[in-house]
Image (cartoon, grey):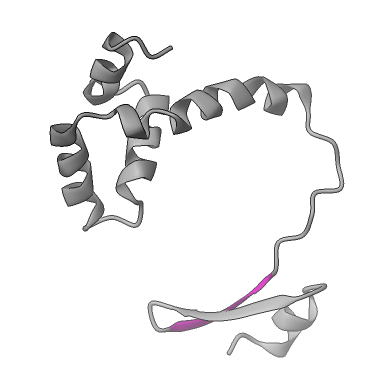
């Protein structure tokens, strides 16, 4: 387990887990108390658009992403979202099909 000093520094609910054989502790996520900044709010539509692409990805690309996801910590859907946000050409066929 992590040292007592580390654990006692957390407030609220503590999540204990093992990651790759290493015992870990973290504070459970709490509700955000500060308002979102204008810059954060500006990004919302981009992320909303990126999350809507998964059902529109063609089966060949989807199979490739699922194969890549078996060796990664992301799901195939997360990979598609990340690729879209980074402007990868693998997702351009979605845009060509009237998405935007």
| Whole-percent x, y for residue 100 in the image | 43, 12
Q: Nearer the viewer, residue 44 or 2?
A: 44
Q: In the shown orientation, is residue 89 left or right of residue 85?
A: left
Residue 24: quarter of image: bottom right
Picture coordinates of residue 43 (x, y %)?
61, 24
Answer above or below: position of 87 versus 81. Answer: above
Residue nearest the viewer, comparing 79 with 56: 56
Residue at 38% across / 77% down in the picture? 20
Q: Quadrant of residue 64?
A: top left
Residue 23 lies within the magenta run: yes
- Magenta highlight on residue 20: no
- In depth, the one of 65 and 94 nearer the eye is 94
Q: Which segment is the magenta one?
A: 22-27
User: On the picture, is 25 further left or further right than 14?
Assistant: left
Q: Position of residue 5 (x, y in %)?
A: 75, 84
Residue 77 x/y as whole percent: 35, 43
- What residue appears at the point 79 percent right and 33 percent down from the top-left corner? 36
- At horizontal 42% and vertical 26% (from top left) the residue drawn is 85
């Amino acid at each position: 387990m992590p040292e007592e000093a580390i654990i006692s520094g957390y407030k609220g609910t503590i999540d204990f887990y093992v990651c790759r054989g290493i015992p870990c502790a973290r504070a459970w996520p709490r509700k955000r108390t500060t308002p979102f900044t204008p810059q954060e709010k500006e990004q919302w539509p981009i992320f909303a658009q990126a999350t809507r692409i998964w059902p529109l990805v063609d089966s060949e690309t989807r199979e490739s992403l699922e194969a890549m996801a078996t060796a990664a910590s992301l799901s195939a859907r997360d990979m598609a979202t990340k690729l879209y946000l980074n402007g990868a050409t693998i997702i351009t066929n979605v845009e060509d099909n009237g998405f935007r």
